[in-house]
Amino acid sequence: MTLPSHLATSPRFKENAKAALADPDLQNALAFVEVNFIARRREVAGRLPEFEALRDSARDIKNHTLANLDLYLEAYEERLTAQGGELHYAATADEARRIILDICRGLGAKTVTKGKSMIAEEIGLNDFLEGNGITPVETDLGEYIIQLRHEMPSHIIAPAVHLTKAQIESDFRRVHTHLPADRNLVEPTSLLAEARGVLREKFLDADVGITGANFLVAETGTSVIVTNEGNGDLTQTLPKAHIVLASIEKLVPTLEDLTQLLRVLARSATGQEMSVYTTLSTGPRRADDPDGPGEYHVVLLDNGRSSMLAGEFRDMLRCIRCGACMNHCPVYHAVGGHAYGWVYPGPMGAVLTPSLIGIDEAGNLPNASTFCGRCEEVCPVRIPLPRMMRSWREREFERHLSPATVRAGLAFWAFFAKRPRLYGFATSIAARVLHWAGAARGRFSYLPLASGWTRYRDFPAPQGATFQSRWKDRDIPPGVDRAP
Amino acid sequence: MAEHEARRVGLFVTCLIDLIRPTVGFAAVKLLEGARCIVDVPLQSCCGQPAFNSGDRVTTREIAMAVIAAFEPFDYVVAPSGSCAGMLKVHYPELFLGDPNWQPRADAFAAKTYELVSFLVDVCGMKSVAARLAATATYHDSCSGLRELGVRAQPRALLRTVDGLKLTEMHDADVCCGFGGTFCVKYPDISNAIVAKKAANIAATGADLLLAGDLGCLMNMAGKLQREGRDIEVRHVAEVLAGMTQEPAIGRTTAAPASPPVPTGVRPSGNPSAKPPAAAR
């Protein structure tokens, strides 16, 4: 497997996080996630009495599909090919890239337009196409911006959410040099209009359009994208060929299942009832169609997912990429998406990334969680994200990948914790020593071995004897009058 | 008057309360006894969360077996912590899934385990407390208690019956304080960023007292508030409900502004704390 995992900075998560915390622009930009996304979701979910029931239903639909994925893949392929589409299975990222390159070369393509696709990020498609003489043009505004900056998305539905408007304005002025230098870009809508104008020509020039898929419908052989900008529609209808790049878990059985999932997707993601555009594509242009692509290809990527199907991370394949988990994650709010160091950030990334690039590379991700459980609380398909992060920690521990200091500390603690009598003895001494040492102020500003704590906060001095030793002596406890 | 026999409750003290703040344990005992429970404290160490959340299942299981066995004689297991109670109630059964010997024992143990305040309200039917405290308090919902055990309304309901206490809600009361067990020392910079937001939300309420049901979170928030020089007392909710606020608040040496007014003549002024813990001398 030749994933662009060598580009991953996940092993340097801690350094990334430190830099992110010190970046005032990023911190300003992140406030949007913490405030707006959460408030919008809460409002729109609250308005729908059956929202919780829909989440159950969404979970069940995905579970059923995953349990019968082979059958639905066959059914999907049959419908798709009957309508003139072509299905390409790609076991690895490398295979997917080559398939796409071959299609593009077959059409003599020079530029391809792209709708937003996280799978394209996962396989590093843009760099690969560019390296092979084909120019990829991102048409989603957020993706377009980060392409100008040569960055990865920092959020799965809002790829440029880490940027302030001022940063985007300065990028546009740097790149769009053909436009008057004194133009007014103060309003966000003026940035949008400028991007639209620039992209309009690219849409018309493109030989191939590549989109992702939010869902693939087995019943009809249809690919579905949801967008708010309409760029996906232009990407997939104008060029000679439309390539859908999707992973195998995007399948749903029927159109009715699709509608249920759509009802939880936009609400969980942007807090909309529906996204502005929901586009269903079924095969290439037919004889009496007014427009549409001459060729319709679907590149179906596995990249390790079929092995997840059989294991303890199967539930992760239910994910519909709404981003609610990261929108509600205090760690994501603090450090943003780039700190996670690869394609998928936040809680869903903390579970998925180790599956795709290995726990030895991505070990920090499932560890960097307080297990507050807010992600699971809002996940539209009820993925037990904290539980699976813990499963990764178990794999890491079994393989002796956790840091030696952590293992040693844990072993020391466990030696006592497994022996309550000895533990009681040791802690009663520790409590008295710390009480004595901290008695003057009632707390410590510095404690050796706990500098991670005391760097930022004080540590309270124990009250003295432990509870258990007081209880054993039935001592008069502090501040309680036990006389009836 | 309850018609059934008194409930035999095994108190799971939690390692932090045992070590750092025994007052909370005695407050829990007082509240439980006030709810007509017979309380005892079997020999114990920790619920095993440090091992569990570090991926060490083998150690976790060993600790869990000892805890389950130690509390088998009791009708109920009660912990003054949502995090530890969540471990006992939600995660112990996960540890023994499919184990013919231990799964039934873990399930039975989980079924009788409760977080303190929800036990008092939901099981014992406690509607009010006889405590008094002149203070303005804000309550932080600790994550495990809130999301794993549904502890939210119960502490607020009882706190509203504390004479003289005014409750004021902070923004994002249900958002993590950044403690996260070993998280706060493994990722101190991120933990600090999270608790800094929490401290700002607490301070914005104007409350002079912060309450929560988990000592880990309380130590984290108290430590941050103190480092920032904010004059806000921090206590476990059980201390207030039990009327045991004579002891200095977390990380303090004197019981300060929020302590109950001392009747004149009872104690010499300038000596607000009753007496130092006997065992500490």
Image (cartoon, grey):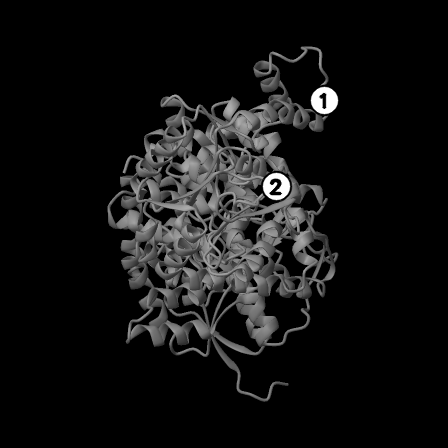
Q: Earlier in the sequence, mark 1 or mark 2?
A: 2
Which image quadrant: the N terminus of chain A? top left
Is A127 rendered above or below residue A76?
above
**Alpha carbons under labels 1 and 2: distance apart:** 24 Å
Q: In which quarter of the image is residue B142?
A: bottom right
* Residue carrying label 2: A34
Give how far across and how far down residue A377 sits, in percent: 54, 56
**Residue A440 spot, x, y in % from top left:** 52, 40
Q: The disc labelled 1 sits on which kind of residue?
A: Val
How many marks can you see? 2
For the view shown, which residue lies furthest in the left direction?
A399
Q: What element carries label 2?
A: helix
Using the rendered image of the protein, determine whether residue B138 is visible from the camera's viewpoint. no
Residue A242 seen anywhere in this rendered image of the structure: yes
Give the chain of mark 2.
Answer: A
Query: Above or below — where is A165 with respect to A244?
Result: above
Residue beneath disc 1: A186
Rendered location of residue A82, percent (x, y): 42, 53
Foreground pick, B149 / A253: A253
- State whether residue A19 is above or below residue B81: above
If the image is split into quadrants, where does the C terminus of chain A sit? Answer: bottom right
Q: Which amino acid does label 2 sit on?
A: Glu
Left or right: B161 in relation to A459? right
Q: Nearer the viewer, residue A240 or B49?
A: A240
The residue located at (43%, 44%) in the rendering is A246
Mark 1 belongs to chain: A
Q: Residue B70 carries which label?
A: none
Q: Which residue lies furthest to the bottom in this view?
A: B3
| Residue B111 at x, y percent in the picture | 45, 74
Q: Residues within 10 Å of mark 1 (few under 14, many from 20)?
A: few
Q: Kindly identify the residue that appears in the image at 40 percent across and 41 percent down.
A: A365
